[in-house]
Image (tube, rainbow, N blue to C red):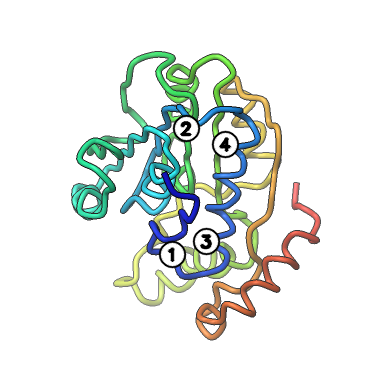
């Protein structure tokens, strides 16, 4: 077991490490033990799953992309932890009440039916289980530029660019209501970054650090 879990991710941006730290701290604050079983839904290449496994949690990561799963397997810590599987976040089936916590990070905005994923998650969480969700601000600067502006203007002028793969735009109230409708209680919310995703700034860790601190002080858009 290691506490330096940052070594087990391919992240380089301060904002991404901040999100990973939020996930880890949420688990530590909710549970007073480490023998926990967790699911990383929409795990990508394992950049959250593998650090959590390094902390001693028994992890399962699922993703719809076989390429992502193969990449994640090549970076896994042991043969059986994390366990990586190809599956669909909207229609996955697992044993009921089998997980202590579920991480769903930067996933719901890609789903046509995020409510289906949340309902499935509620069925597999144990009593007093924890769900950790992160989504982009659907009306923040990033989404305004790369989702709304791209879909409404850029993709029409340059059809080869295509539409954004973000099919949902969440405000704080929208994601909160969606979670409550699926049977969850919202315990805590937090902010990520503000403008450090911009190409000219994205490689500056110092700027990203201060940008994340600024984001913490900004009022949420309801």
Residue, disc 1: 11
SS assignment at label 1: loop
Q: Nearer the viewer, residue 90 or 154?
A: 90
Task: Give above or below for 131 relative to 156.
Answer: above
Residue 18 in the image: state x and y as whole percent: 59, 58
The answer to which of marks 3 and 4 sits earlier in the sequence is: 3
Quadrant of the image containing the N terminus: top left
The answer to which of marks 1 and 3 sits earlier in the sequence is: 1
SS assignment at label 4: helix
Q: Within 10 Å of the Cα at label 4, are there few (<14), some (14-19), or many (20+) other Cα atoms?
A: many
In the image: residue 116, left or right of residue 198: left
- Please give the name of the residue rendered at 30% of the width and 35% of the height, measured from the top-left corner: 88
Residue, disc 3: 16
Residue 221 in the image: state x and y as whole percent: 75, 52
User: What's the CA distance linking mark 3 and mark 4?
Assistant: 17 Å
Residue, disc 2: 102
User: What's the CA distance linking mark 2 and mark 1?
Assistant: 20 Å
- Please give the name of the residue rendered at 57% of the width and 52% of the height, measured from the top-left corner: 21
- Please give the name of the residue rendered at 46% of the width and 54% of the height, measured from the top-left corner: 5
Residue at far front of view = 1
The answer to which of marks 2 and 3 sits earlier in the sequence is: 3
Task: Give above or below for 104 relative to 13.
Answer: above
User: What's the CA distance linking mark 4 and mark 2?
Assistant: 10 Å
The answer to which of marks 4 and 2 sits earlier in the sequence is: 4
SS assignment at label 2: strand
């Amino acid at each position: 077991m290691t506490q330096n879990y940052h070594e087990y991710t391919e992240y380089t941006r301060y904002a991404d490490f901040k999100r990973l730290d939020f996930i880890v701290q949420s688990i530590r604050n909710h549970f007073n033990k480490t023998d926990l079983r967790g699911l990383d839904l929409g795990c990508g290449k394992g950049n959250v799953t593998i650090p959590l496994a390094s902390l001693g949690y028994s992890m399962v990561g699922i993703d719809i992309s076989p390429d992502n799963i193969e990449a994640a397997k090549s970076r896994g810590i042991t043969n059986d932890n994390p366990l990586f599987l190809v599956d669909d976040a909207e229609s996955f089936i697992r044993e009921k009440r089998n997980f202590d916590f579920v991480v769903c990070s930067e996933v719901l905005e890609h789903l046509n039916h995020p409510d289906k994923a949340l309902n499935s998650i509620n069925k597999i969480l144990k009593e007093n289980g924890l769900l950790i969700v992160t989504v982009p601000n659907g009306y923040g600067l990033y989404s305004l530029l790369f989702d709304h502006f791209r879909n409404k203007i850029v993709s029409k002028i340059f059809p080869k660019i295509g539409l954004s793969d973000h099919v949902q735009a969440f405000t704080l109230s929208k994601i909160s209501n969606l979670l409550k409708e699926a049977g969850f209680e919202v315990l805590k919310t937090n902010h990520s970054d503000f403008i450090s995703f911009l190409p000219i700034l994205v490689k500056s860790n110092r700027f990203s650090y201060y940008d994340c601190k600024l984001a913490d002080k900004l009022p949420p858009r309801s």
